[in-house]
Every structure is written in structure tokens, then in C-alpha cells.
Image: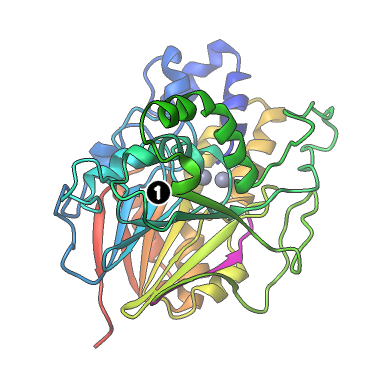
Amino acid sequence: MCNVLHEAVAAVPKTDRRRLLAMMGVGAAGTLGASVLGQDAAAAHPPQGPAGPGGGNAKSRTELVLLGTAGGPTHNGGERFGISTAVRYKNRVYLVDLGMGAFQRLAASGLRDNSEPNGALNKVRGIFFTHLHSDHTVDWPTLYATGSVNVTDPGREPIEVFGPGRRDSATRVYPPSRPTPALVNPSDPYPGIAAMTGYLRQGFAQDFNDRIRDTDFAGPDVIFRAHDIDISDLWRVDPAGKPPHLDKPIEVWQDGEVTVTATLVDHHPTAPAFGFRFDTPDGAIVISGDTTVSENLIDLAQGADYLVHEVIDAQWVDEIVSALPPEAAEPVRTHLLEAHTTIEQVGRDVAEPAGVKNLVLSHLVPGNSPDKSWRRAQRGFSGRLIIGSDLMSIAVRPSP
Ligand SMILES: [Zn+2]
Ligand SMILES: [Zn+2]
């Protein structure tokens, strides 16, 4: 999700905002900034899985944990935290995206090392970013800056961090008739995860150097190692950002018995954007990232045990855009529906052709839609539908 909706809403005359806010379930125009997406999520989706230290499915060898399930960068005021998903195999934890509050959710999930008070990140082996939208990355600075004091064995292997590399082409301007806006940081307007991490290293230098000189603080280079996922042989990203079809998955990392592969999903014009697949001896878990219906993702997810997929409520989009001025309505509709997957599409057009056993809905937009709305995703899907909630823990076991 981008800021396009928030900006469009801000352009609505104040007198019309009450109607728009009423559609979004918001009582006062003054709360708009905190309420565009998914408020009151907790009331609609109370945590369903066991949670808390030592909770979850700690005894299963492979575990899928939804840390945060909200889509979009706007703080919604509810209890649904920003998008973040964890896969645990034995004692190793892999995180996909770090939305708002992900570190808090990790610490509360039972995935932390409870034998060490300062070991919240002890089990984390890898971090994977599907794309660099802020709703997927804002807690990366939190982990990066505090990693050294949340790992009790700084002599261990670094946490490997993977994500998109630098983009050469600027995103297309939409609608094309609009004046071209100035770029932020024009000398490096589209840094990838490695460069972004380098900027964090600079930004937190005072804290790092204070601690390194004053104590035996390990410093971020000891704790984290960032990698751009190389797609140079596959695609030179163009302004439209629609990825090509891939013949095979991208090999990202083999960590012992855990294999991590990726594909290019379609979150245009944002690109590259990845979906990830984790294969353990117990099964396969695929995480979509942000995407519209993607053939690449359907290929990646073939036969998977669990597909964690983003979803947006198209009826809500219709309600939102109906309250916008015509010039703002179409760009909002285009972004929301062409870069994301609707309730009607996700089961029928993605999970069913992928042949997955379980479809887990996450990155829910809006987060406050009632469960009966999300259950429409079952239509056309013959597997099991799971409506995700924060801290839901799912044991992944080999098929009998
Ligand atoms: Zn998103
Ligand atoms: Zn996004």
C-alpha cells in the first residue's frame, strides 16, 4: 500500500470528508491521519492462536507465525500491527517484512530466546524484505539499531538480510498528464536494501560509536549482513514495473535444511517486489508480499502447504473512491486494484490454480472489515481458508 489514498483523501474538501470518514468508520475529521486504513482491527479479528512467551506451536519442528497482519503505512489505531510474518524451523527464525510494531510482536510471540533476558533476536537467522514500501520496512531501523543489545552471543553468525536491489529507472508518473514531481534524494532515489542499510549505518553512527567506544558493543556490521537479491539476468526494471514471467524460482538462500526461493510478483509500478517460499522437511510455506494476481507467484506456490497472501476488499475501495473528486478517484482505484489482490481473486485465481492446501489471508486492507467479508475468498477455492490475525501460530507438519 502506498500513500496515494491518504493524499487523495487529504485533497477532499473538508465538508465532504465527513461522508468519506463515515464510510471508513471514522468519527472525526481530525483523526483522519490515524484512521485511513484498518482501524478497530482487534475487535473484528481477536488473536486466534496461542500467543506469548513459550506459547504458539513451540513443540512443532516447523511453525508459521503471523506477527502483524495489517496492510498499509497509516497507523490505524487498532490492535492489528504492521505486516510481518515469521517462519521457524527448529531453533531458527526467518522473518519476512518488518512492518510497524514487528519487533514488539516478535518479542511477544514465543519466538524469542526466553533463556536470555536480552536475547530477543537470538533465534533470528534471516530477514527477507518483499519490497521496500514503508509498511513492510519501518521496523528494520528498530532491529538494525538495537540488534547488538538484543543478541547475547555476538560471536554467532550474522543475521542475513535479503531484499530488492537498487532500481535504475524512475517509477512512471500517473496519471501521465500530471506534472513530474521532484524526486526525494535525487542522487540515489531508489536505493536497495543494502544501500538503505548503509544509510541507517550512517544515521545511527553517533549511537553506534558511543557504545563501541564506551563498552564492548558489537556494532551493526557484526550482527547483520545485507544482500541485494540479484535479478540482473532476469529483468531490468522499467518505469511501468510489470515483471516478466520467470521460468524458475530465484535461489536466495540454503540454510541447512531450509531452502529459500523467491519470484518476482506484480506490485507495479513498485518494483522489484518479491514473494518468498520456505521449504523445510515438514512442508512449504509461501508468502506473497504485495501483488496483484501473479502467474509467477502461482508457479512458486505450486502444491505449497501454506500460502500467506495479501488481500484487499474491492467493495471498500468502491466506497472510498465514490467519495473522492473524480480527478483523485481514478488514480486511487487504479493503484489499489491493479497493485493488490481482491477477496474475489485470491482464492479462485491464485490459491486454487496453485493447488495450495491452506490459504492464509494477511496484509488485510482494510483491517476492520468483518470476517464474513474475508470468508468470500473461499469461493472458487477447494482448500482451507484461514483468516489471519496477529500472533496466530500454525504448526506445519508433514502430510501423512
Ligand atoms: Zn503493503
Ligand atoms: Zn506495497
Residue drawn at (53%, 68%) of the image: 349
Quarter of the image holding residue 56? bottom left
Magenta-highlighted residues:
257-266
Query: Residue under circle 1?
Result: 84
Q: How many marks?
A: 1
Question: Which quadrant would the N terminus be assigned to in this image?
Answer: top right
- Percent across and percent down for residue 389 are 29, 49
Q: Element under label 1?
A: strand
**Callout 1: few (<14), some (14-19), or many (20+) C-alpha neighbours within 10 Å?**
many
The colour scheme is rainbow
In the rendered image, residue 92 lying in the magenta stretch gets the answer no
Is residue 295 or residue 271 the one in the foreground? Answer: 271
Q: Is 145 situated above or below 62?
A: above
Q: Main secondary structure of the magenta part?
A: strand
Is residue 73 or residue 41 the one in the foreground? Answer: 73
Is residue 215 or residue 316 the one in the foreground? Answer: 215
